[in-house]
Image (cartoon, rainbow, N blue to C red):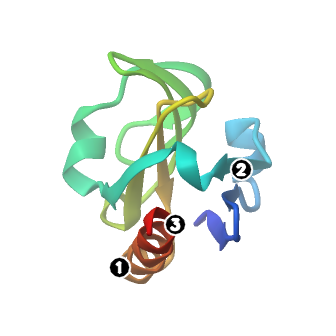
């Protein structure tokens, strides 16, 4: 199941869908634009940079969902299909990174980068 991304004027909101709410123990995460350092497609990165599961579900090859602690700090995961995963690098937030699966990674990434570039000008 994909995460719904709402591109707001002052923040991004990630809404976890369906049973993944139970698996991640999370309904939604909101992040102010100014706390987003970078966004990229994450199929290769996310397979390597997992960390230790703190809360959630993790079945190799099937799902990674919940909170994980890695070398770069706390990360939130909701990914089943790594080819549809995006990685958000954050600062001044609870999570250092968000790994989320979206339905249209290229389109979502383009819309987010467009919004980020407008916020920086």
Question: What is the crowding at mark 1: few (fewer than 14 residues within 10 Å), some, or many (at least 20)?
Answer: some
Screen quadrant of the N terminus:
bottom right
- Disc 1 to disc 2, how far (Cα)? 21 Å
Q: Which residue lies under the disc numbered 1?
A: 106
- Where residue 87 appears, as percent x and y from the top left, is 39, 50
- Where residue 22 appears, as percent x and y from the top left, is 77, 42
Identify the secondary structure beneath mark 3.
helix
**Residue under the point 29% across and 54% down:** 42
Of callouts 1 and 3, the N-terminal one = 1
Q: Is residue 11 depicted above or below 78 in this figure?
A: below
Q: Is residue 50 left or right of residue 75?
A: left
- Where residue 116 appears, as percent x and y from the top left, is 46, 66
Residue 86 falls in image quadrant: bottom left
Q: Which residue lies under the disc numbered 2?
A: 30
Q: Nearer the viewer, residue 110 or 57?
A: 110
- Where residue 59 appears, as percent x and y from the top left, is 46, 37
């Amino acid at each position: 199941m994909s995460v719904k991304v709402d591109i707001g004027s002052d923040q991004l909101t990630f809404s976890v869908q369906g049973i993944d709410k139970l698996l991640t123990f999370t309904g939604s995460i909101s992040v102010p634009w100014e706390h987003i350092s970078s966004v990229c497609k994450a199929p290769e990165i996310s397979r390597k940079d997992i960390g230790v599961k703190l809360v959630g579900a993790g079945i190799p090859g099937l799902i990674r969902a919940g909170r994980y602690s890695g070398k770069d700090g706390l990360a939130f995961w909701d990914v089943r299909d790594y080819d549809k995963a995006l990685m958000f690098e954050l600062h001044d937030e609870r999570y250092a990174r968000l790994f989320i699966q979206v339905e249209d990674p290229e389109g979502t990434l383009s819309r987010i980068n467009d919004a980020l570039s407008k916020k920086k000008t």
